[in-house]
């Protein structure tokens, strides 16, 4: 088997394959064309749904900003927490009590009166 | 995507024939080519045009290998459950005599050569078939063929050499 005869054989084989490609029946050719169009349309639909590349870093920045904000809230929250909790407890007392709002408005005066009475009698 | 459209238009017929050689079935070949086109458009449309060729061949060969795996499993199940293999049954249309007027001698010889080549390539073991078609028809070099077939360059050389030897033995009189 010489190199020359092998090259001749391979050329003949390639020619025969090219002929087979050229002589594909019209139905097959039309079906392939339709498949190609479908693939390209699907690709375009997908591409139009996708975010532009320049938006991708913005997504990263937004995520980083959210993470930093949450971290900052957690960091500063313990300092304010006791005062807030006391205020919240006082609010709950006001809302659930049976006494009128005037009673709570005069609470300081009543405290003083009580203290003064105890002081004079005791 | 006009560039991608041009590229696919240029390779779709060969891809179809390659898949038909491997599967022996036009419908399966269509599905495989369509899948390969979709995969290329979805995943690699943004790559450079010179990359599309090797990528498409790799995807196509991968789809053909998937089809072979699925078919093997299906056939095994058929054997286990005692079903008949429809693919083994002869197509009555293919056995009918063609009574149309004969082609001129030259054309007839070409057609016979094509038919003989198609039959011989279809009968090659799958890896030899892949190596032969990618090297001879698609014009890929050994390294590109190895990437498309997902094997070593040494394996490509072995499969290719065996394929050429087998085809020459069968087709020397036709080509």
Image (spheres, coloured by chain):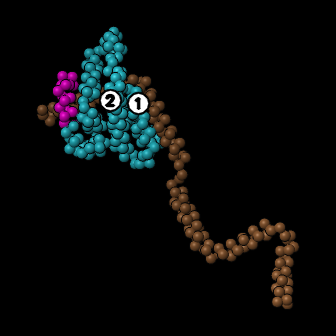
Chain colours: A brown, B cyan
The x and y percentages for residue B110 are 27, 21
**Which residue is at a point 42% across and 36% down the rendered structure image?**
B35
The x and y percentages for residue B152 are 24, 45
Q: Which numbered disc covers residue B76? A: 2
Does the magenta portion include B39? no
> Residues at marks 1 and 2, common chain?
yes
**Which residue is at a point 28% across and 22% down the rendered structure image?**
B115
Residue lying furthest front? A122
- Number of numbered callouts drawn: 2
**Which residue is at a point 53% across and 53% down the rendered structure image?**
A52
From what the image shows, is residue B46 above or below residue B32?
Answer: below
Dot 2 crowding, Cα within 10 Å, few <14, some 14–19, many 20+: few
Residue in the foreground of this view, choosing between A13 and B75? B75
Q: Is residue A43 left or right of residue B167?
A: right
Q: CA distance from mark 1 to mark 2?
A: 24 Å
- Mark closest to the chain's N terminus, 1 or 2: 1
Q: Quadrant of the N terminus of chain A?
A: top left
Q: Quadrant of the C terminus of chain A?
A: bottom right
The x and y percentages for residue B55 are 36, 44
- Which secondary structure lies at badge 1? helix
Q: Is residue B101 visible?
A: no
Residue lying furthest top? B99
Q: Chain of mark 1?
A: B
- Magenta segment, principal secondary structure? helix
**Residue indicated by mark 1:** B30
**Which residue is at a point 49% across and 42% down the rendered structure image?**
A43
Dot 1 crowding, Cα within 10 Å, few <14, some 14–19, many 20+: many
Q: Is residue A99 visible?
A: yes
Range covered by the magenta-colored residues: B160-175
């Amino acid at each position: 088997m010489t190199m020359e005869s092998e090259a001749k054989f391979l050329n003949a084989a390639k020619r025969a394959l090219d002929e087979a490609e050229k002589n594909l029946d019209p139905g097959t050719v039309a079906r392939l064309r339709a498949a190609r169009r479908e693939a390209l349309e699907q690709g375009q639909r997908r591409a139009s749904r996708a975010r532009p590349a320049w938006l991708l870093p913005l997504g990263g920045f937004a995520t980083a900003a959210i993470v930093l904000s949450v971290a900052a809230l957690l960091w500063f929250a313990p300092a304010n927490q006791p005062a807030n909790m006391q205020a919240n407890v006082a609010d709950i007392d006001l809302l659930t009590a049976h006494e009128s709002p005037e009673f709570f408005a005069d609470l300081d005066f009543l405290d003083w009166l009580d203290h003064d009475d105890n002081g004079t009698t005791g | 995507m006009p560039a991608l459209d041009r590229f696919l238009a240029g390779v779709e017929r060969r891809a179809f024939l390659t898949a038909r050689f491997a599967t022996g079935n036009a419908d399966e070949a269509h599905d495989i080519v369509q899948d390969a086109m979709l995969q290329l458009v979805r995943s690699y449309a943004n790559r450079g045009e010179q990359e599309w060729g090797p990528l498409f061949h790799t995807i196509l060969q991968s789809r053909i290998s998937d089809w072979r795996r699925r078919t093997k499993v299906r056939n095994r199940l058929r054997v286990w459950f005692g079903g008949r293999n429809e693919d083994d049954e002869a197509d009555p249309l293919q056995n009918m005599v063609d009574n149309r007027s004969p082609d001129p001698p030259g054309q007839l010889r070409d057609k016979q050569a094509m038919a003989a080549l198609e039959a011989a390539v279809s009968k090659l073991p799958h890896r030899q078939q892949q190596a032969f078609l990618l090297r001879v028809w698609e014009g890929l070099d050994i390294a590109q063929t190895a990437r498309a077939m997902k094997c070593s360059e040494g394996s490509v050389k072995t499969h290719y050499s065996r394929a050429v030897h087998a085809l020459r033995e069968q087709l020397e009189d036709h080509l």
